[in-house]
Image (cartoon, rainbow, N blue to C red):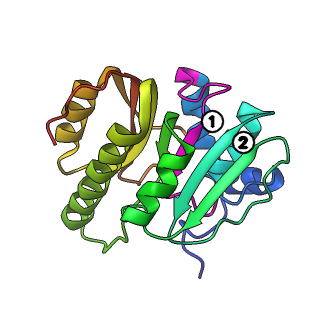
Amino acid sequence: MMSQRSRPDHWTVKARKMGYPARSVFKLQEIQEKWSPMTRGEPVLDVGAAPGSWTLYALKTLGRGARVTAVDLKPLNISPPETGELRFRQGDVFTQEAAEFLAEGGPYGCVLSDAAPATSGNRLVDSRKSYDLVMRVIDLAQEHLAIGGNLVVKIFQGGDEQEVRERIKGLFAESKTFKPKAVRSESMETYIIGRHFTGSAGTG
């Protein structure tokens, strides 16, 4: 019998009809509509981009001249519009080779990360793994964001997310914590948005 989580829900069906590979597109859409972390004319970095819904949404939303750099261990499953430029690297985003690739496309007006660690089913273990991953994504943001740029990052609740919030507060003029409507009710995930990168040193 198909589990509740594996059964296509309203968001999944809607995403497929619109040409997106995953329901996660609506999480970014709601964040963009509320806080506009992505700005037309500013390049975007998408960390943990596969299967590509956030990358495709960024390209479509920013329109002609959009520039998106995406990295993931897995391949993208999208057909990007010809109106923008997509640079994609398949591999570990935290290697030196990837750092050089990221630098070529930056500095960025926005860093996005819907990345999540491989989960074990143990809430404490998974939330810690999420914390470690997010802290490394923030390191990338510090290195590659333009002053005034924005960050959107996913984190699992139930662990050290308060430390993540404090670090983001030290790096950005404004920070928000937000759970979009498209997040499943039973999910641990939430999103932290940092707005207007100041370039200040973080505590991580």
16 lies above or below 138: below
To which residue does mark 2 refer? 59
Disc 2 is placed on an element classified as helix
Task: Mark 2 vs mark 1: give the one in front.
Answer: 2
Residue furthest to the bottom in view is: 1
The disc label shown at residue 29, or none: 1
From the image, which quarter does the N terminus lie in? bottom right
- Given the image, on which type of amino acid does mark 1 rest? Gln
Instruction: Identify the residue shown where x is 61% and y is 25%.
Output: 39
Viewer-proximal residue among 133 and 161 = 133
Disc tally is: 2
Residue 93 place in picture, x, y as percent: 43, 61
Magenta stretch holds residue 148: no
Residue 192 position by quadrant: top left
**Image side of residue 83 versus residue 77, left or right:** right
Viewer-proximal residue among 93 and 18 = 93
Disc 1 is placed on an element classified as helix
Residue 184 place in picture, x, y as percent: 49, 51
Q: Residues within 10 Å of mark 1 (few under 14, many from 20)?
A: some
Query: How far apart are the two marked residues, 2 and 1, measured between alpha carbons?
Result: 12 Å
Instruction: Identify the residue shown where x is 62% and y is 70%.
Output: 75
Residue 114 place in picture, x, y as percent: 48, 51
Segment colored magenta: 34-52
Mark 2 touching mark 1, by CB under 8 A? no
Instruction: Identify the residue shown where x is 65% and y is 54%.
Output: 87
The disc label shown at residue 55, or none: none
Mark nearer the N terminus (2 vs 1): 1
Magenta region's main secondary structure? loop
37 lies above or below 190: above
79 lies above or below 144: below
Instruction: Identify the residue shown where x is 45% and y is 61%.
Output: 98
- Given the image, on which type of amino acid does mark 2 rest? Leu
